[in-house]
Image (cartoon, helix red, strand yellow):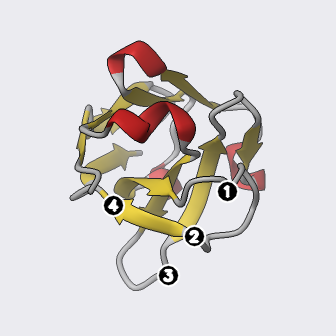
Amino acid sequence: QVQLVESGGGLVQSGESLRLSCSASARTFSSRTMGWFRQAPGKEREIVAAISWTGTTYYAEFTKGRFTISRDNPKNTAYLQMNSLKPEDTAVYYCAARRLGWSASPSKEGYEYWGQGTQVTVSS
């Protein structure tokens, strides 16, 4: 089992920044790809970014260089730095841990553990 706890969400104005954190309980954290997803009201959950245990990353096109995913394996923590936030970034953001051996990719498949989500609201 892997327990994930997100933090760092909040209410910001357009153009501001937030850093989300995802703390994991498992000793296997350093061997797993970690992903960040988001879900806005009335929309499907979509992948934002992913980072493999080797540091390989994937970013959704809409991040366009504004977001950076990273991880600190000794701390069992993944991060999502979000800059130049826009109102359309408003959503609940979730972190997720992928099955062992699955690398970072655009696919939403293979994520077996999820956090409870943290709300990000960007006002115009």
Q: Are marks 3 and 2 in contact (CB under 8 Å)?
A: no
In space, the residues marked 3 and 2 are separated at their CA atoms by: 17 Å
Tag nearer the camera, 4 or 1? 1
Image disc number at residue 110: 2
Residue at x 43%, y 37% (from the top left corner)? 29
> Taking 56 as reference, is 86 left or right?
left
Per the image, the residue denoted by label 4 is 114
Q: What element carries label 4?
A: strand
Q: Nearer the viewer, residue 50 or 42?
A: 50
Looking at numbered disc 3 in the image, what kind of residue is underneath it?
Glu
Q: Between disc 3 and disc 2, whose residue precedes?
A: 3
In space, the residues marked 3 and 1 are separated at their CA atoms by: 22 Å
Residue at x 26%, y 57% (from the top left corner)? 1
- State the quadrant of the C terminus: top left
Would you call the spot at circle 2 few (<14 residues within 10 Å), some (14-19), or many (20 or more)? some
Would you call the spot at circle 1 few (<14 residues within 10 Å), some (14-19), or many (20 or more)? some
Q: Between disc 4 and disc 1, whose residue precedes?
A: 1
Residue 62 percent across, percent down from the top left? 71, 53
Q: Are marks 3 and 1 in contact (CB under 8 Å)?
A: no
Q: Are marks 2 and 1 in contact (CB under 8 Å)?
A: yes
Tag nearer the camera, 3 or 1? 1
Per the image, the residue denoted by label 3 is 44
Q: Is mark 1 on a helix, strand or loop?
A: loop
